[in-house]
Amino acid sequence: MDNKALRPSKALFILLLGPGIAWYVFAVIAPMLGSLRYSFYSFEGVRIKDFAGLANYIELASDTIFWTSLKNNIVITILCVFGQIGIALIFATLLNTFYIKLKNLHRAFIFFPGVLSTIIVGFIWTIMYNSDYGLINFFLRALKLDFLILPWLDDPKYVLLFVSIPVIWQYIGYYMVIILAGMSNISKEVYEMAEIDGVTGMKKLFYITLPLIKNTVMVCLMLCISGNMQIFDHIFIMTGGGPGTSTSVLAMYGYNKTFTQFRIDYGNTISMGILIISFAIILITRRIVAGGKDDG
Amino acid sequence: MAEAVKKYFGIIFTNSILILFSLSCVFPIIWMIYSSLKSSSEFNVSIISLPQKLMFKNYVNAIKVSHMENYFFNSIFNALISLVFVILISFILGYFLSRFRFRGRNLIYTIILFGMLIPIPSLLIPLFIQFKSLGLFDERFTLIIPYVAFGLPFSTFLVESYIKGIPVQIEEAAVIDGSGFIRMLFAIVMPLSVPILTTIAILQFFTKWNEFPFALILVNSENLKTIPLGLLNFSSQYSTDYPLKMAALTLAILPVILIYLLFNKKIIEGMIAGAVKG
């Protein structure tokens, strides 16, 4: 829409839009373009030293820790897609049935961890995982399930799963409320008809709800993937990427290279790697999901 | 009869599952809050028991040893200043994007949309280099620069779709009555947009209050550090005194809990609107 009567003068246009756009470009677009440029140079401190051509990228391509970190990001993302969106779907379905009491309270409770800071969640779960003073071991002992007790954050074999659990826990509610909003657009009659035809429980979820909220689930999937490609805070607090490199993720690795090994040029190239890979993964997922949409 | 009993148990069963799950979402925080009122030795004897005597001393100590008041001030300062700018800029941007077609509109739209997709970790190190070389590193206003910029995409789109729902005739009438553009924008459209601007304010406050990576990378002086950084210091120094640590953590989330108790409906609605837009 364009409204001639309202349209301000050109000067006013620039005066009002200019500062905001300039601010945004300075803090978002400029560093991104800067990053691309820096990635072709070697650095001394925070200063550009020499043109390095593709040297940084060649190092990146053959850097096994970088690829391990990417693999860890992908594992965490897959765990979160099933954990967050999967569980969110189930609870949203349950909350949508008429015989559940205290719906608003449930919604407020389940969403609550989502407003906490990632740092707090990291700290609390570190305490919860603690072998002597943690809630997890306490409950396992109380239920006489001692044999399930593991060195939660210290065993490289499972640690990736156990750092994902707090992340999943924190955001189930977020996806749940998005899915609930999607479900509220489905008319009641559809469900009533289905119930008359004897479709109940999980069948209702798979054959009726899911196809009707495909777009909402797609939104969740995109948010989940892009969110987990960025994961940093939880890992930083809980394990710092360890033990070894077993929970190293891309952001963590970039941070370590830059601020503990002081390789700014290489840290910056890792940033470029994160950017390229994230966009690639989002595009690919979009294509796959959009491709599957035709038969729906 | 058997059918009815089965159904009855089904109802109890699903209700119980939901109740258990809901409790698991809040219990860790409740546990943290009441444990923060125990003495260290009491906590070591039983981690689950309620405090025998309320040890508010943990809070006094937490504030004293961690200089929490300093971190609190910085977090509030950054959050409030940032959200004022975010509201102002996103309101103007959202208004122009929704009411006018102009040269560069598509470009602006694209870069803002782009900002919603760009992974923040990919900008941390370039931003660090940029800030270091321009002398913007570790200053009072340092964090406000990225905080405002990264708050814009989400907020601008919220404003844009909200403005679409306001009938343009109101603005036209104002202009016909001789009101200037600026007056029309801030004295007529802005008050009409208060609901969405409040949502933005609440959501931005949360994000800024909780923000960690930018603060970690762009700020270094003790007197500029925000709460998450303060907690990091604190926790590495007092790693074994759990109640003390929990007192510090509780202080840090108190404002968040308060705001959530008051506005949880609005917060959830805002999050949904923003997510679906992205």
Image (cartoon, coloured by chain):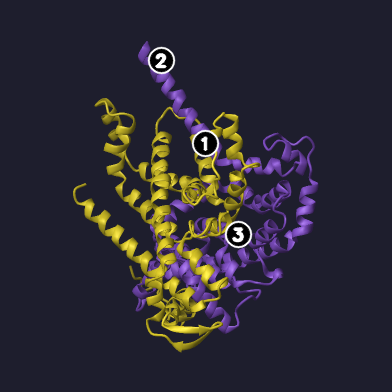
Chain colours: A yellow, B purple
Q: Chain of mark 3?
A: B
Residue B163 seen in the figure? no
Which of the two labelled residues, at mark 3 and mark 2, occupies the earlier sequence position? 2
Write the residue at 65% across / 40% down.
B31
Residue B209: which numbered mark, if any?
A: 3
Q: Which residue is mark 1?
A: A148
Marker disc for residue B5? 2
| Label 2, label 1: how far apart the Cα atoms are | 35 Å
Q: Look at label 2 and name its amino acid.
A: Val
Q: Position of residue B229 (x, y in %)?
A: 64, 62
Above or below residue B34? Residue A199 is: above
Q: Foreground residue, A162 or A29?
A: A162
Q: Secondary structure at mark 1?
A: helix
- Which residue is painted at 43% across and 47% down in the image? A175
Are there few (<14), some (14-19), or many (20+) residues within 10 Å of tag 2?
A: few
Q: Quadrant of the N terminus of chain A?
A: bottom left
The amino acid type, in three-letter code, at marker 3 is: Trp
Instruction: Let me know if marks 3 and 2 both belong to one chain.
Output: yes
Using the rendered view, name the quadrant where residue A32 is placed.
bottom left
Circle 1: residue type:
Leu
SS of the residue at dot 2?
helix
Callout 1: chain: A
Residue B33 shows in the view: yes
> In this view of the protein, which residue sits in the foreground, B238 or A284?
B238
